[in-house]
Amino acid sequence: MSVISIGGKNLSTIDKDTVHQLAASLSVEITNADDADDYLVLLRSLESVLQYVEDAPDYIHPELRPQAVVGSREYWKPRDEDNPMNAWNFRCNFVSSNPTSALLRDRTVAIKDNISIGGIPTTLGTFAEALSRDGSPPISPIDSSVVSRILSAGGVVRGSSTCENHCASPLSFTSASGPVHHPLLHGYTAGGSSSGSCAMVAAYALKQQGLSRHWGDIVELGIGSDQAGSVRIPASFTGIYGLKPTFGLVPYTGAASMAPMIDHLGPIASSLEDIATLLKVIAGFDGLDPRMTPESPLLDQVKDYPQILTDFRTKIRSSSTQPRAPLRVGFLTESFAVAGLAPVVRDTVRLAAKAFQAAGAEVIDVSIPLHSDGPIIWTASTRPSMSESLCQGKTGGHLSYLPPHLQPHWPPSQRVFDLQSTSNPALVNIMLSGQFAHRHFGPSIEAKAHRKVLELRSAYDKALREVDVLITPCAPTLAMPHPDPQSRILDRLASSIGVTSNTCPFNVTGHPALSVPCGSAATPEHPDVRLPIGMQIIGRRWEDETVLMAAALFEEGRIAAPM
């Protein structure tokens, strides 16, 4: 430790009582009066340093400055009649004045509301007073790295999509602005926490298929964040594709963190080609995100995912006299035994084996016993400190650039606490869990859980040396009705329990995972409506293209052997 100077006491707001109070918070006493005086001097030095930084102007990194757009960065709150699914948070129509490529020319994109868009409020699906000191919606002074790249590729950013309160729900009933509705059944979950992005992309796909509903303004493509399944789960519920890329492939800079170890941003689309194109646009080192590693590709070294996918499709569609491009596909045994897995989901995903085989893949069962402990390891390795990033805005200890406009209040006021408990009790559980873990277990338990993450990663890596991809169910059930907002906390959370059992393990291990629509089924309440079912394809780290190829193989097999 170094002390840069010994400050004076003239402007100090602390005294010797402060020193004793701080010691008491550590459950110790400073009994020597001279020691207390000296510690007071040292603390006043820190006080002056911190006050200096507090008063200094903030720094907007040049790479994050909002790029010029055609017209102005005007935004607006959509009317209810234009937003029947409640999938939009704020609307805009941003097009770069000087795009550098045409990969996304004129393609419309929705950005999840925890990802910064310059000139638009970022609300994290929560209440403004929880995020800003004056209670007004915090307007972003930056474009996140992914938003900047989408604009540079010619994409049209249409606005911020509704997300769950602090992204802390796999279902879509917790946003401060109200629930997000399934595009096929109003009053049913669209999944979370990237609920708005998935609902709108799914609605766009349904419209292209000829279904006529009033969905309001919708988009072709979406970006979501995924910490436990928040891209894949809503994609599964709504019948589209959602990719959680390899950890560190896509920069998280400019998005609000839940916990740095599990933060991912990923593409949402109704076709594999669009997933591949979006991934090519947003992937690559940005020089700012500490989640990126020496394995993260530089921008000019990002793989050409669309071309790889095109080439693979050409190979598997070639005549039988040409060499095929088969993959070895492993169905993860333990994933079909998770609690709460609906039989119709289990059986539908199991049937996918026939499609893979019809396309020339070798299909085997793979057992990874530690997968059953995956949700436990995810929870123990993240929950003890999750509120520090999610609710308090702390850095993860490495040099990072957090969104400067998000300044959460901590501890929460009684009013904010009550609002959050009513809106999303899972968020309050995260707050209480951090306090409990700190008081009753200490920091060593989270450190041990991190070591268990490495054990879990090793188990998946070992299995993926024997097969090219693993297959699991994604969301364990069909979409269900929103819970009664007046019911008790456990009743409201009951339908969320176990939803991420097959998705969250791959957030801590960092493996790429894609939700793939694989079937549908009717619900007893609505026998005339078939709701989507999704399976999950998991690949080796840094081999996201293999996941896309496996999904393409499945698509081809479904044509040859309809399920």
Image: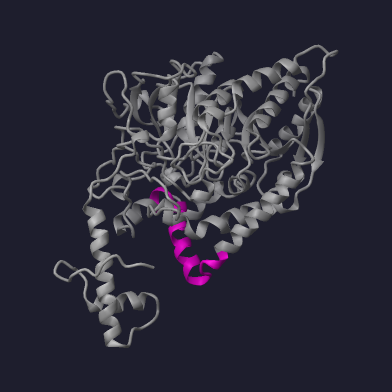
Q: Dominant secondary structure of the magenta stretch?
A: helix
The verdict on residue 459 being magenta is no
Along the line of sight, which residue is nearer the eye, 545 or 559? Answer: 545
Question: Is 348 situated above or below 500?
Answer: above
Quarter occupied by residue 43 = bottom left
Q: Is residue 184 visible?
A: no
Quarter occupied by residue 415 = bottom left
Q: Which residues are magenta?
A: 421-445
Q: Which residue is found at the position 69% from the left and 26% from the top? A: 549
The answer to whether 311 appears left or right of 192 in the picture is: right
Q: Which residue is found at the position 39% from the left and 68% from the top? A: 1
Q: Which residue is found at the position 48% from the left and 21% from the top? A: 220
Question: Is 67 situated above or below 335?
Answer: above
Q: Is residue 43 visible?
A: yes
The verdict on residue 440 being magenta is yes
Query: Which x, y percent locates residue 141?
Result: 30, 37
Question: Is 456 situated above or below 344?
Answer: below
